[in-house]
Amino acid sequence: MLRTNAEKLMQMSVMGEIASPTIRSVYTISATGKPSVLPGVGGITYNLRVGDPACGWEADHVEPGVSVENKENDPRSGQAANIAFNVLSCVGNQARVVTGDGKGAVGTVTGKHGGIEHVLVDFPPEVLEKLLLGDKILVKAHGLGLKLLDFPAIKVLNIDPRLLEAWGPEPRGDKMEVPVTHIIPAAIMGSGLGANQVHSGDYDIQLFDEAVIEQYGLDSLRLGDLVAIIDADHSFGRIYRQGAVSVGVVVHTNCVTAGHGPGVTTLMTSSEGKIIPKINGRANIGSLLKLRADI
């Protein structure tokens, strides 16, 4: 059993509202120069949840389930409330509807999307039918500051302790064996690279090289998959470092624009390569947290 400092962590309420879909530019230009008009971020997505394919949709950056943001705007501190909402919320946190026809329904935080700064929440389909844009969602934030007490060379981020327990990484000497569905080379990571912190947001797996897609089996990526990125260090931001390993969760769909693709929110990193990825097809948060029975 892993020793952590979970009993020392704060549990806090943070809240946002279901955000409307947004379109900044009607036409999206693909990496091959083709213009298209596609649904993107925001809203309530009825037919896309964790466990579904991350690729193959007529979509660009679409977020599964419900997209939530805190719209409070204090003139003294700008978007500080939404920054806190994103940083404090962790994957696996409980989320509860507190207004509207869906009041009382409980869901789960499944990721964070940078740029738009949304927290993503999964609810069962029958709950989605009751929700409206603007409904308030309260997240019981728990996980910020989590540490593996016997593995100082491995940092954990953005993860609820209950997800860490369900995930079940296993000690191997001074290393940790971690179940993942895919291994991804850092060379194909795109948008989000270079960010100076990974307590919010994500960065994207570029899927424009057919040979790499086939080599690593990336056409089978699903939303909610736990994936290992090799030669990537997320200790204090997202950088390339040979030998480092970072692990995260796939949070949004593929994209057509250059430098973009399915997004990954960081959950674990080791600059010293103390993480050993172990391929397991069931390493998906939808399965681990029993969000769906069919994956």
Image: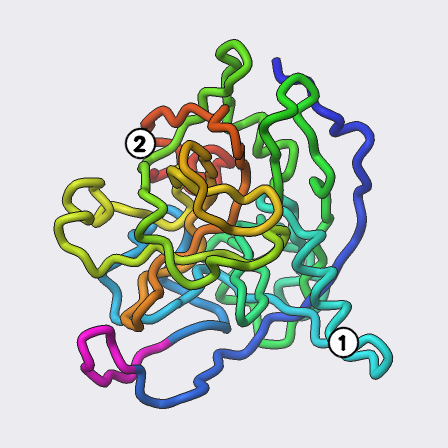
Mark 2 Cα-neighbour bin, 10 Å: few <14, some 14–19, many ≥20:
few
Q: Does the magenta stretch include residue 37?
A: yes
In the image, the segment drawn in magenta is 29-39
Question: Where is residue 42 drawn, in percent x and y?
Answer: 50, 72
Give the mark nearer the N terminus: 1 vs 2.
1
Q: Please identify the residue farthest to the top as the structure is shown.
A: 173
The residue tagged 2 is 281
Q: Which type of secondary structure does the marked residue at label 1 adopt?
A: loop
Task: Say above or below: 192 vs 199.
Answer: below
Q: Please identify the residue farthest to the right as the structure is shown.
A: 76
Q: Which residue is drawn at 14% across and 45% down?
A: 214
Instruction: Kindly indicate the quadrant of the structure image that contains residue 166.
Output: top right
Q: Residue at x 47, y 33 (%)?
A: 288
Whole-Å distance between the Cαs marked 1 and 2? 40 Å
From the viewer's perspective, is 211 left or right of 154?
left
Residue 227 visible from this viewpoint: no
The residue tagged 1 is 72
From the viewer's perspective, is 51 left or right of 235?
left
Instruction: Pick whichever, 111 or 241, lies toward us.
Output: 241
Q: Which type of secondary structure does the marked residue at label 2 adopt?
A: loop
Q: Main secondary structure of the magenta part?
A: loop
Name the residue type under label 2. Answer: Gly
Residue 89 visible from this viewpoint: yes
Instruction: Pick whichever, 76 or 236, lies toward us.
Output: 236
Task: Say above or below: 175 vs 284.
Answer: above
Q: Do the residues labelled 1 and 2 touch (CB within 8 Å)?
A: no
Task: Say above or below: 98 vs 238.
Answer: below
Question: Where is residue 186 drawn, in percent x and y?
Answer: 36, 46
